[in-house]
């Protein structure tokens, strides 16, 4: 039997499966295509999430309005490599041991029999196309054949010398001169070219943008969007840390600047301007891809999923970057558009990046993967008010977890210390309620969702676990 005939038969089976499982989302005429957009270090500073009143993200806002915006979505690991392993494997870090930069997907012995999302699609008849930052180390080793078409990893160029900060990895400033010199822009154009083609089989296109990850370098025109003197700075009262218990996490050393040092240099506003500039540049790149998908020959049968690997602090809780279990680290943009998904939907149900793998399998009629620990978001895509009683769990290093529902964030550290925040009254998490006996029942109810399995940190010989 030829490969073409096998593909035709598989497509007929998929159409039947999608129609049978539709349950409200319209049945596609053919297996839906997928555009899977990953963004690095983007917090809730996009217009539709309201994390910063000054940010300009027209393309992200327009994409969110085309489908479902998840306003209470969270990563499972607040650092790049661990988060991406969790997304692409559909498993918790407490199950895989991939908590940090300690092991990428292809290195993890705990994932030796697993395949990442795009390879699962390839094994079931999809043409896979990908480029940019997806898995942190790329698709190496046994995963090297994941993509039929590899768009490459085009890095954003650094300036020849540091511009505004002693450590080059945390530098910022206007560079290079033109968008066309940026790797993210080049990737967006490559992806748009693919979306403009007529494909003979369903495709899975994965695109990973680096900005707004540090160093914060983009062309001058994006800096010009923001006047640093008029920007709204994050809320970061120094007394906020007075009710925070000491833990292994709060003692963790990283290369990120200390908030006191940023204040001492007088560069807080300039840093905020640079982060906003990088967000708007990234938004422009997303727009290129989203517009190409909307104008392409498969527009009516293409699902677009957009997510960021984790959030990012810019001074909140006297902290910079990620590596915490507070909202600025774990909350992430997540949105899904596609056939049968009504425009303008939003939900505050607690949802996880972990849910993306089972959701895509469900929407595209692919077999469910045994061991996936998320759940399909289809019920929420059909009804934003659907019953959704399971909170989200985020983890930073073994036995340190945050449990998040519609109202509360409960943090339990490996040393037994705790934090509890009521987001209805304290969205900025200024007041830790954990030591107030009035909330013991709340803590006990949320603690039921803490992982019962916490495997040790998976170690790769010769691999340091911590980097930025």
Image (spheres, helix red, strand yellow):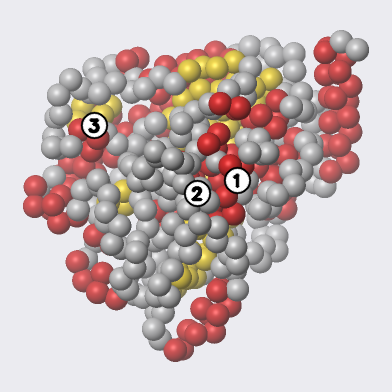
Whether residue 433 is visible, yes or no, is: yes
Q: Which residue is mark 2?
A: 458
- Image position of 389 with respect to 63: above or below: below
Q: Residue 17's spot in the image, x, y percent?
A: 86, 37
Quadrant location of residue 336? top right
What is the C-alpha distance between the residues marked 2 and 1?
8 Å
- Image position of 281 with respect to 428: above or below: above
- Image position of 371 with respect to 179: above or below: below
Q: Residue 89's spot in the image, x, y percent?
A: 61, 42
In the figure, is residue 301 to the left or right of 234? right
Q: Secondary structure at mark 1?
A: helix
Q: Which residue is mark 3?
A: 223
Whether residue 332 is visible, yes or no, is: no
Q: Are marks 2 and 3 in contact (CB under 8 Å)?
A: no
Dot 2 or dot 3: first in sequence order is 3
Q: Are marks 2 and 1 in contact (CB under 8 Å)?
A: yes
What is the C-alpha distance between the residues marked 2 and 3?
41 Å
Q: Are marks 3 and 1 in contact (CB under 8 Å)?
A: no
Quadrant of the snapshot with the C terminus: top left
Nearest to the observer: residue 387 or residue 186 = 186
Q: Residue 460's spot in the image, x, y percent?
A: 46, 41
Quadrant location of residue 87? top right
Query: Tag 3: Cα neighbours inside 10 Å, few (<14), some, or many (≥20)?
Result: many
Q: Secondary structure at mark 3?
A: helix
Looking at the image, the residue that sits furthest to the front is 461
The structure residue drawn at horizontal position 46% and vertical position 25%, both measured from the top left corner, is: 132
Residue 110 bears which disc, if any?
1
In the figure, is residue 81 to the left or right of 159? right
Quadrant of the snapshot with the N terminus: top right
Dot 3 or dot 1: first in sequence order is 1
Dot 2 or dot 1: first in sequence order is 1
Nearest to the observer: residue 340 or residue 200 = 200
């Amino acid at each position: 039997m030829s490969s073409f005939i096998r593909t035709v038969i598989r497509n007929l089976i998929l159409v039947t499966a999608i129609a049978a499982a539709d349950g409200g989302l319209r049945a596609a005429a053919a297996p839906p295509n997928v555009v899977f957009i990953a963004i690095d270090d983007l917090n809730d500073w996009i217009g539709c999430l309201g994390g910063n009143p000054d940010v300009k993200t027209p393309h992200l806002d327009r994409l969110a309005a085309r489908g479902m915006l998840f306003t209470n979505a969270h990563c499972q690991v607040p650092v790049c490599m661990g988060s991406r392993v969790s997304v692409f494997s559909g498993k918790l870090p407490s199950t895989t041991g991939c908590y940090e930069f300690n092991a990428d997907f292809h290195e993890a012995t705990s994932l030796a029999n697993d395949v990442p999302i795009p390879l699962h699609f390839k094994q079931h008849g999809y043409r896979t196309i990908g480029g940019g930052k997806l898995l942190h180390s790329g698709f190496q080793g046994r995963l090297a054949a994941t993509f039929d078409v590899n768009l490459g990893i085009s890095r954003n160029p650094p300036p020849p010398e540091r511009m505004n900060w002693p450590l080059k990895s945390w530098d910022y400033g206007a560079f290079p001169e033109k968008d066309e010199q940026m790797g993210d822009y080049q990737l967006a154009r490559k992806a748009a070219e693919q979306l403009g083609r007529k494909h003979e089989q369903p495709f899975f296109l994965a695109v990973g943008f680096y900005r707004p990850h540090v160093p914060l370098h983009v062309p001058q025109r994006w800096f010009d969007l923001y006047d640093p003197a008029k920007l709204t700075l994050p809320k970061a009262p120094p007394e906020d840390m007075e009710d925070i218990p000491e833990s292994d996490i709060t003692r963790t050393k990283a290369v990120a600047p200390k908030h006191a040092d940023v204040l001492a240099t007088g560069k807080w506003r300039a840093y905020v301007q640079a982060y906003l500039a990088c967000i708007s540049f990234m938004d422009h790149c997303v727009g290129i891809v989203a517009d190409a998908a909307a104008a392409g020959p498969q527009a009516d049968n293409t699902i677009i999923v957009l997510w960021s690997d984790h959030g990012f602090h810019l001074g909140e809780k006297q902290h910079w970057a990620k590596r915490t279990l507070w909202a600025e680290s774990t909350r992430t943009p997540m949105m899904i558009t596609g056939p049968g998904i009504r425009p303008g939907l939003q939900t505050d149900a607690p949802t996880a990046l972990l849910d993306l793998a089972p959701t895509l399998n469900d929407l595209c009629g692919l077999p469910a993967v045994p061991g996936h620990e998320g759940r399909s978001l289809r019920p929420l895509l059909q009804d934003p008010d659907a019953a959704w009683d399971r909170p989200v769990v985020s983890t930073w290093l073994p036995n340190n977890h945050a449990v998040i529902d519609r109202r509360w964030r409960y943090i339990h550290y490996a040393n037994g210390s705790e934090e509890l925040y009521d987001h209805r009254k304290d969205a900025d998490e200024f007041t830790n309620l954990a030591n107030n006996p009035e909330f013991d029942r709340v803590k006990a109810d949320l603690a039921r969702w803490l992982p019962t399995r916490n495997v040790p940190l998976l170690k790769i010989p010769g691999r340091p676990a911590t980097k930025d």
